[in-house]
Amino acid sequence: MIPAAFDYHRPTNMGDVIALLEQHGDDARVMAGGHSLIPMMKLRMAEIPHLIDLQDVQGLDGITIQNGRITLGALVTQHDLINHQELTESAPILREAALQIADPQVRYMGTVGGNVANGDPGNDMPGLMQCLDAQIALIGPGGPRSVAAREYYQAAYMTEREDDEVLTAISFDIPQGGYAYEKQKRKIGDYATAAAAVQIQKSAGQITSASIAMTNLSDVPIWSADAAAALVGTPCDELAVKAAVAAMLGDIDPVEDNRGPVAFKRHVAGIILARAIQRAWDRA
Ligand SMILES: Cc1cc2nc3c(=O)[nH]c(=O)nc-3n(C[C@H](O)[C@H](O)[C@H](O)COP(=O)(O)OP(=O)(O)OC[C@H]3O[C@@H](n4cnc5c(N)ncnc54)[C@H](O)[C@@H]3O)c2cc1C
């Protein structure tokens, strides 16, 4: 399908982006890789009279690893994540997750900022960023501010970001210990039926800290503090994994859709999480 007519803006600095957002209000939307927004416009599920392309705005495309902290500019693509060697050494879970998003064509264009900003429950990066306890940097007419990824998502496509704010970067401490990003999908290139991001640290044969987040099992990503707590202090035995899965199942709220009925999704979520915990433990 062909989208409705729109004006195309291509500013080169953030001041002009914000001025355009203020000027056009609800009629304007920024575009990064366009691989969520353009399909929505073509399907006429979104009508955007003023499209503001971020591609020429300076300073949004860097990956920095400094003083134990990783910062990803909003325009860093999933392809960039996969091919950045230092990043893969510092935070291998990013590469493991990005490789499970869509296909190479989508990953060349799709950005971390667009994936996180969007609020689509099917996107893989929001849960991952919650697992990593990331901070999301925003800028708007009132200046810059930062929101924790664990507090950013309110409902499907509704986030803490105001309409006239732009996501500029995402940052988090270099993760420690073992990791796993496990995703079940109907076919290559599909969104998750269920996905789990897990980071685990261990010492003397016991888990000392854990972080667990689930994707596409509610209208927002689910960071399950109770599931992580069920693992801490255990040798990651069958009992502990079962307790973590039970706690996670208490936090998610899947709905029936073309990926299956609720019971099936809960079953898949349990298997995916158990697998991810086991792999993260083995790598810790
Ligand atoms: C066939 C197909 C399969 C896919 N499968 C998956 C999948 O399995 N997992 C997955 O996670 N994703 C998947 N995607 C989505 C893809 O990863 C998207 O590209 C990504 O989610 C959005 O990034 P983008 O840069 O394309 O954002 P855009 O499409 O440009 O923007 C998406 C939304 O975010 C807003 N936005 C973008 N950047 C910013 C910013 N910096 N600040 C504020 N708002 C911003 C836009 O206004 C828009 O509302 C798939 C896409 C396709 C086409």
Image: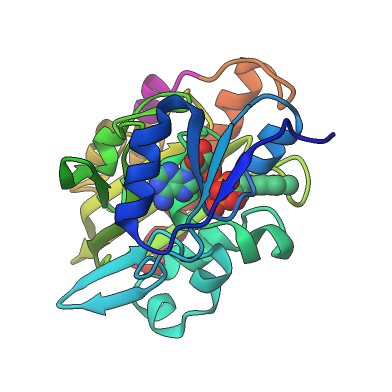
Residue drawn at (40%, 69%) of the image: 283
Q: How many marks?
A: 0
Q: Residue 252: within the magenta?
A: yes
Q: Is residue 236 visible?
A: no
Which residue is farthest right?
A: 1
Question: Overall secondary structure of the magenta stretch?
Answer: helix
Q: Nearer the viewer, residue 86 or 154?
A: 154
Screen quadrant of the C terminus: bottom left
* Residue 263 appears left or right of 166: right
Screen quadrant of the N terminus: top right
Q: Residue 11: within the magenta?
A: no
Q: Is residue 119 visible?
A: yes
Provide residue 177's location: percent of width, then percent of height: 29, 67
Task: Classify 23 as above or below 20.
Answer: above
Task: Classify 64 as above or below 150.
Answer: below
Provide residue 115's location: percent of width, then percent of height: 49, 47
Residue drawn at (18%, 74%) of the image: 68
Provide residue 17's location: percent of width, then percent of height: 38, 50
Q: In which quadrant of the rendered view does residue 244 lie?
A: top left
Q: In which quadrant of the rendered view does residue 62 lie?
A: bottom left
Provide residue 11's location: percent of width, then percent of height: 45, 58
Residue drawn at (62%, 54%) of the image: 101
* Residue 53 appears left or right of 201: right
* Residue 97 appears left or right of 131: right
Q: Nearer the viewer, residue 92 or 49?
A: 49
Which contiguous range is marked in magenta? 245-253
Residue drawn at (52%, 34%) of the image: 120
